[in-house]
Structures are given as C-alpha cells and as structure tokens.
Image (tube, rainbow, N blue to C red):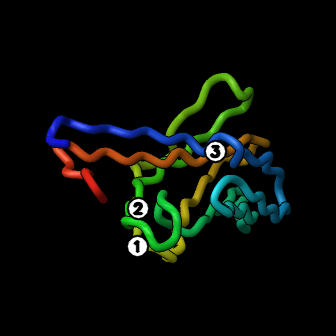
Amino acid sequence: MSAKSQFHLSVLPVILIWHAATNLTADAQRSFSIAVAATNQNGAVISWQAQSATPVGDLILVPEFQLQRSSDFKTWSPIGSPLTGTPGQTLAVLDAVPAAVFYRVESIISLEYAELSNA
C-alpha cells in the first residue's frame, strides 16, 4: 500500500466538565483515561497516558494528541500544539482558563506513504 494514507481518529467520548477544585477521571474506548485536576491559580491540569491506537500485540501506532476546549460543545479550540509520547508516557497540559469548560482529546495518526500491507 504505497498510496498516501491519513487517519484521523477522534476520541469524542472523552469529554469532561471542569469546575474549580474538581478532580475527575473518565474512561472511553480502548481504556483511554483522562484526568483533570485543579491548580492553585484557578486553572486545570489535564493529563492522560499515550498509548497505541492498535490492539495489544499488533503493530504499535502511537498517535499525536490534541487537547481541545469548548464552553458550548459546538465550538472547539485547540490548547497548545499536538503532543506525542511513547506508550505509557503521561502527557499533561496546563489550561489557565478559570471558567467551567469541556475538554476532549483528539488522537491523530498521519502516515504519508506508509507501507502497512500485512502489518
């Protein structure tokens, strides 16, 4: 398969409502977990573990992750740049927005000219 391949996977069920002094955890597909913890400055630290997008024992494909924020579930804004990590590495983003917002994590796999036949 030598054609240009791009895959965009959104982990939509990983949406959290954050309020000051709240520590929440949500589970989604593939046991993906995201945690939100309040900071002393009325912000939040959003964290999750990087993991392969494929089943255990298969080819390891760790996506880039883009954290996004919304106040209305309609308009989503990226927070920072996409993050990459190794499987099991904890990724974290500090969000200094003091208002109640919703978060989601998008996983992005972009493999241009990937040879994935029989992988």
Query: What x and y, as percent, mark residue 45?
Result: 64, 63
First in sequence: mark 3 or mark 1? 1
Between residue 37 and residue 47, name the one nearer to us: 47
Q: Nearer the viewer, mark 2 or mark 3?
A: 2
- In the picture of the structure, the residue carrying the numbered disc 1 is 86
Residue at 82 percent of width and 56 percent of height: 20
The residue shown at (75%, 58%) is 27
Q: Nearer the viewer, residue 25 or 29?
A: 29
The quarter of the rendered structure image containing the C terminus is bottom left
Q: Earlier in the sequence, mark 2 or mark 3?
A: 2
Q: Are marks 2 and 3 in contact (CB under 8 Å)?
A: no
Callout 2 environment at 10 Å: few (<14), some (14 to 19), or many (20+)?
A: some
At a point 25% along the width and 51% down the height, the residue shown is: 117
Residue type at mark 2: give it.
Answer: Val
Q: Quadrant of residue 86?
A: bottom left
Which amino acid is tagged 1?
Thr
Give SS at disc 3: strand
**Quick one: label 1 or label 2, which is nearer the N terminus?**
2
Determine the CA span between mark 3 and mark 1: 20 Å
Q: Residue 61: image x %, image y %?
A: 38, 61
Q: Is residue 119 left or right of residue 38?
A: left
Q: Residue furthest top?
A: 74
Label 2 – label 3 distance at C-alpha: 18 Å
Residue marked by disc 3 = 104
Which residue does the numbered mark 2 point to in the structure image? 62
Q: Is residue 101 left or right of residue 53?
A: right
Q: Secondary structure at mark 1?
A: loop
- Left or right of 102 in this view: 57: left
